[in-house]
Image (cartoon, rainbow, N blue to C red):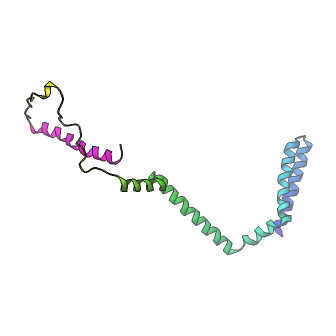
Amino acid sequence: MLAETICSAVSAAGLGIAAVTAYRKRFLTATRIAAYSLVPIGLVLTGVVEWVAGIAFKPSVWLGFGVLGLSWLLFMTTRAIERRSGTTRAERKAARAAERNEAVAPAASAPSLGAGATAGPAAAKPQPQPQPRAKKKQEAAAPGDDFSDIEAILKKHGI
């Protein structure tokens, strides 16, 4: 009963403000204010206010809102984690399918960083190879061996 009285008072006040606005010759604004002010009395007459007041004081209704809130919180948490990982469900599924179907040849070609045979007259003559002077130069050449690992990783990812 109190809710219906409050809604009626809000509608009456809104209609009064609309009348003052119309008196100031702002008819479009006055019409809009009158439309908004008739909504609360319309809700009272249709019974929506009574229905809302009836469910607002039931503990089972508030428990239902709590469960809906928990559901929303869990959903948004999973979405945030999914976005942070940078992948979507479809992308993960495609990655798993590609992983199963991926054919990495065990006898993949060696990287082309080593000394290869060149065509032409220079290939016929063996070139003298300089002797390494110190162990440091050999260690400097060792990172060249790691390129085969990098190449295998790049091939695995399709790059």
Q: Nearer the viewer, residue 119 or 138?
A: 119
Write the residue at 44% across / 56% down: 93
Give coordinates of residue 109: x percent, y percent.
24, 43
What's the residue at 64%, 68% (across, down)? 65
**Residue 36, position as x, y percentages in the image:** 82, 53
Drawn side of residue 155 relative to residue 56, left or right: left
Q: Quadrant of the C terminus?
A: top left
Asked whether 55 or 148 is in front, the reply is 148
Q: In the figure, 53 relative to 26: above or below?
A: below
- Identify the residue at horizontal 84%, vertical 58% (top origin): 10
Specify the segment rendered in magenta: 133-159
| Left or right side of 121 for 151 | right
Quarter location, residue 155: top left
- State the predominant SS element of the stretch in magenta: helix
Question: Which image quarter is the N terminus in?
Answer: bottom right
| Residue 144 belongs to the span the image colors magenta | yes
Q: Answer above or below: position of 57 versus 88.
A: below
Query: What number of labels is visible?
Result: 0
Q: Specify the farthest residue to the top.
A: 121
Tell me residue 52's x, y (percent).
Answer: 76, 68
- What residue is drawn where x is 91% and y is 48%? 19
Nearer the observer, 105 or 142:
105
Q: Position of residue 60 (x, y in %)?
A: 67, 75
Q: Is residue 36 magenta?
A: no
